[in-house]
């Protein structure tokens, strides 16, 4: 069984662009990598440009991207009208166990212990060492 996640970025107009991650979407793995390596909007947008991922890793080249690595055409970034729409569709249509959103320079996660709020994601270990 996999632990899926959705990874998104909130844009200045309030919309959210997001992709789906199939494997290891839990906070100790995907959350740690996102918070430790993808720290800028530019880095997050580069990650999202890969489209849906089967796995996330510390570099773009080592991430498993369905479109880039397997030639699957319909695994592109989705756009949602708002954070609330992302939250609803991420847990529903995208079938994600966890939702991540990069907003104003910080990561937040939704779905921890099925709480109904976004929680700030803090990485305490520097992954650039």
Image (spheres, grey):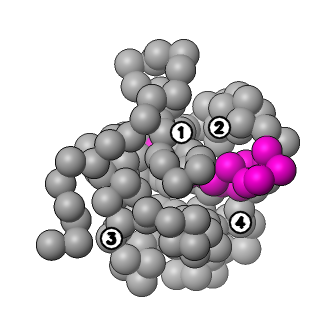
Viewer can see residue 93: no
Q: Are marks 3 and 4 in contact (CB under 8 Å)?
A: no
What residue occupies the far front of the structure in this picture?
104
Magenta segment boundaries in residue numbering: 4-18
Q: Say what secondary structure mark 1 lies in.
A: strand
The reply to whether the C-beta atoms of the residues labelled 2 and 4 are less than 8 Å apart is no
Q: Residue at x 37, y 77 (%)?
A: 59
- Residue behind mark 1: 99
Say which residue appears at 84% left-offset and 42% top-offset.
81
> According to the image, label 3 marks what residue?
58
Of pointers 1 and 3, the one earlier in the residue sequence? 3
Q: Tell me if I can see residue 95 in this picture.
A: yes
Q: Is residue 84 magenta?
A: no
Say whether residue 9 is magenta: yes
- Of pointers 3 and 4, the one earlier in the residue sequence: 3
Between the C-alphas of marks 1 and 2, the distance is 7 Å
């Amino acid at each position: 069984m996999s632990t899926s996640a959705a990874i998104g970025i909130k844009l200045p107009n309030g919309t959210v662009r997001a992709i789906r991650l199939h494997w290891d979407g839990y906070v100790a793995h995907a959350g740690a990598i996102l918070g430790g390596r993808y720290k800028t909007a530019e880095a997050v947008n580069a990650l999202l440009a890969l489209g849906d991922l089967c796995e996330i890793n510390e570099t773009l080249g080592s991430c498993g991207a369905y479109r880039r690595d397997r030639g699957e055409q319909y695994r592109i970034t989705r756009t949602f009208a708002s954070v609330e729409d992302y939250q609803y569709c991420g847990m529903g249509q995208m079938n994600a166990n966890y939702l991540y959103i990069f907003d104003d320079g910080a990561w937040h996660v939704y779905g921890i212990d099925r709480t109904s709020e976004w929680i700030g994601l803090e990485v305490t270990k520097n992954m650039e060492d």
